[in-house]
Image (tube, grey):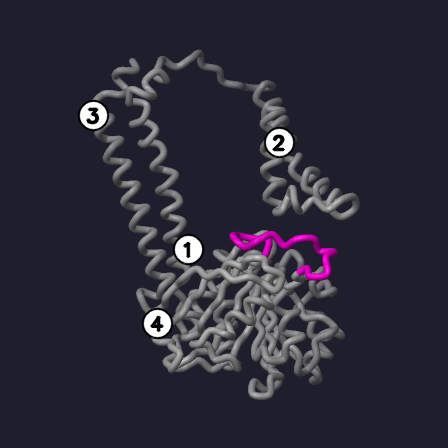
């Protein structure tokens, strides 16, 4: 086919229509996600920033039910995401909590997202909670939050931060975390009202718990004996008393580590836990009724539509005077077969494996030689970028 036939008026018109459809789908999907996050106008969502004790900026998403005011305050919850993530990965929990009457502060932990750089861990003022302790104080000071009814939640590394703060702060009335396990320092009444969620297939379960089989061994562990001092405690059963702050439960959903932050079963269990511990004002929405998947699906549709729109957009741009010099007949055609194909596939497969040694080298350099946080503040992300650079240079 000749070049002029490819860029004829009929094809340009079809490309323009396709681009318009893609953009319309993208916009509609974003509006749906925006509405769901705000529970269709019943929750106000805003960005807030505040400094921690040594002046590092913490950015957070604040979700406030619109009927919560200084005259009618509500319980508050700080949610902390996991390692190498940001606050957007906390949306499932944050959205469901806010639409049930909680004021939610979903933070970018220091060193993640749009919060500041954490600094040198060897410095005396290093914030070992990565902004969690400061965020708790910020939330409690809001005039529409009941300061005596606040809780902490988190996933993975964020769970560890939430656990550490709740352990040393008896004013935290409730703690729910996933992808982490309480330790020997947990007791029957500290942290208060503690829910532990860890997936049956969590890749880090043995490192977190010290046992090989959570379902068979964890409730008989020394950690559980200290935190739940009853004979033969069982998974999924609540022990203790919420009023006294001694409520305890371990829940094991059928999930891997990453799935714990988006598991409907885990989210439902955490919602009911916070309801019993912090007692928001009625009416209460059943914990099984969750809208966050709509928001996640809508953002996926927007992503796909955005990527798809690049094809008709590129076609239209190639028809303009600025990009017209790029038009031309296709070059000679070559298809690798047999040994040539196998050789190319093997080489590309080996190049992909370079990712692992590069990541290990970065972590080894950081741990055993010299800290490289200043150059690689997000080592996994930068490792991926470095991997792409190396394999493309070799390729």
- Separation of disc 1 and disc 2 at Cα? 32 Å
Instruction: Tell me how far mark 1 sits from mark 4, CA to CA.
Output: 23 Å
Question: Under tag 3, what secondary structure?
Answer: helix
* Total numbered circles: 4
Is residue 44 rendered magenta in the image? no
Q: Does 112 sit above or below residue 189?
A: above
Q: Which residue is mark 1?
A: 296
Is residue 390 or residue 234 the one in the foreground? Answer: 390
| Disc number for residue 380 | none
The residue range painted magenta reads: 110-126
> How many other residues sit within 10 Å of disc 2, few (<14), some (14-19) or many (≥20)?
few
Numbered circle sitting on residue 10: 3
Q: Nearer the viewer, residue 252 or 338?
A: 252
Give the image location of residue 260, x and y in percent. Answer: 55, 61
Up the image or down, 284 lies above or below 387; here it is below
Cβ atoms under marks 4 and 2 closer than 8 Å = no
Query: Percent from the top left, x then y, of residue 68?
Result: 38, 76
- Foreground residue, 126 or 332? 126
Q: Earlier in the sequence, mark 1 or mark 4?
A: 4
Q: Secondary structure at mark 4?
A: loop
> Which comes sooner in the sequence, label 1 or label 2?
1
| Residue depicted at 70% across the width and 79% down the height | 187
Question: Mark 4 or 3, which is nearer the eye?
Answer: 4
**Visible residue check, residue 128:** yes
Q: Residue at x 46, y 76 (%)?
A: 145
3D distance between C-alphas at marks 4 and 3 = 51 Å
User: Is 123 one of the magenta-colored residues?
Assistant: yes
Q: CA distance from mark 2 to mark 3?
A: 42 Å
């Amino acid at each position: 086919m000749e070049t002029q036939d490819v860029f004829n008026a009929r094809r340009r018109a079809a490309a323009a229509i396709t681009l318009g459809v893609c953009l319309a789908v993208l916009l509609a999907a974003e509006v749906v996600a925006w509405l769901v996050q705000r529970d269709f106008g019943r929750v106000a969502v805003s960005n807030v920033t505040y400094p921690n004790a040594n002046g590092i900026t913490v950015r957070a998403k604040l979700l406030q039910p619109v009927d919560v005011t200084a005259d009618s305050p509500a319980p508050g919850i700080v949610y902390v995401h996991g390692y190498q993530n940001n606050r957007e990965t906390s949306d499932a929990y944050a959205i469901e909590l806010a639409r049930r009457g909680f004021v939610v502060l979903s933070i970018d932990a220091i060193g993640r997202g749009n919060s500041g750089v954490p600094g040198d861990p060897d410095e005396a003022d290093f914030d070992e909670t990565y902004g969690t302790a400061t965020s708790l104080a910020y939330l409690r000071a809001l005039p529409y939050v009941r300061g005596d009814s606040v809780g902490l939640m988190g996933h993975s590394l964020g769970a560890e931060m939430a656990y550490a703060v709740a352990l040393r702060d008896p004013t935290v009335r409730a703690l729910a975390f996933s992808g982490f396990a309480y330790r020997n320092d947990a007791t029957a009444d500290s942290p208060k009202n503690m829910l532990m969620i860890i997936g049956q297939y969590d890749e880090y379960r043995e490192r977190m718990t010290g046992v090989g089989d959570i379902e068979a061994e964890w409730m008989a562990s020394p950690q559980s004996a200290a935190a739940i001092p009853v004979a033969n405690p069982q998974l999924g059963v609540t022990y203790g008393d919420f009023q006294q702050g001694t409520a305890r439960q371990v829940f094991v959903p059928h999930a891997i580590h990453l799935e714990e932050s988006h598991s409907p079963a885990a989210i439902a269990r955490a919602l009911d836990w916070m309801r019993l511990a912090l007692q928001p004002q009625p009416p209460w929405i059943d914990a099984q009724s969750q809208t966050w998947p709509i928001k996640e699906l809508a953002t996926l549709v927007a992503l796909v539509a955005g990527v798809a729109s690049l094809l008709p957009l590129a076609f239209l741009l190639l028809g303009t005077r600025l990009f017209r010099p790029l038009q031309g007949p296709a070059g000679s055609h070559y298809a690798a077969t047999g040994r040539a194909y196998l050789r190319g596939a093997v080489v590309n497969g080996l190049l992909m494996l370079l990712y692992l040694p590069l990541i290990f080298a970065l972590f080894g350099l950081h741990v055993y030689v010299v800290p490289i946080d200043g150059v690689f503040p997000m080592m996994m992300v930068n490792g991926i970028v470095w991997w792409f650079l190396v394999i493309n240079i070799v390729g």
